[in-house]
Image: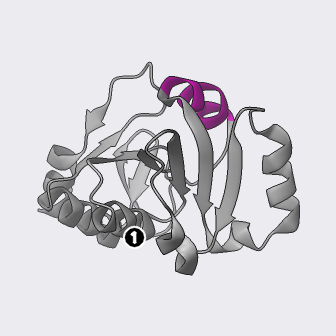
Amino acid sequence: MLFARCDDRLVHGQVLFKWVDHEQIKKIIIVDDKTASDIIEKQMIQMTKPKNCEVSFLTSSQMDQIQADTNNKSMVLFKNIHLACHFVQQYHLASLNLGRMASGIGKTKVLSNLFLTSEESQRLLDTINQGIRVYSQMVPEDEAIDLETYLRREAK
């Protein structure tokens, strides 16, 4: 089973101590070109990962190598919304979880920790239109917020 999450921080406390336990994750797959080529960042992530959880790093061009393990759940982490949407559509996943996406030039505030460009919003709407649930939920204890209404309002 695959659990897809897009968060500009990739691996951090919420992922390591909340989502891994809640979703019973056995493998974290990070899909990010910069991280996959950064030896120091990869070592830091490897040092902080839970002992019972494997971590692998892929570039965007390698993400088609991801295999769904029917016995163990894997979390696939992205920094890039376009890649995350492509992935969930390609693998016909039921949902995409969004964590924090920081503010920046050309981004609009959607929720308190979610800022998107118009292109990202449209890509998420396209994903929703394919029957995939897109929601924001920082930690499992928080209420999941379906983003369809927010994104459609922004698109007007």
Identity of the residue drawn at 54% across and 53% down: 77
- Reply above or below: 78 against 4: below
Q: For the point 49% across and 68% down, which residue is it?
A: 105
Residue 88 as seen in the image, left or right of residue 128: right
Image-based side of 46 in relation to 56, left or right = right
Membership of 37 in magenta stretch? no
Q: Nearer the viewer, residue 125 or 19?
A: 19
Residue receiving disc 1: 82
Vertical arrangement, residue 38 with respect to residue 131, above or below: below
Which segment is the magenta one?
13-22
Q: Residue at x 49, y 52 (%)?
A: 101
Q: Tell me, yes or no, if residue 102 can be seen here.
A: no
Left of 48 or right of it: where is 68?
Answer: left
Residue in the image at 48% along x and 39% along y:
71
- For the residue labelled by badge 1, is the local secondary structure a helix, a strand or a loop? helix
**Spot occupied by residue 127 in the image (x, y as percentages of width and height):** 23, 62
- Residue type at tag 1: His
Main SS class of the magenta portion in the image = helix
**Which residue in the rendered view is the most extreme toward the top?**
141
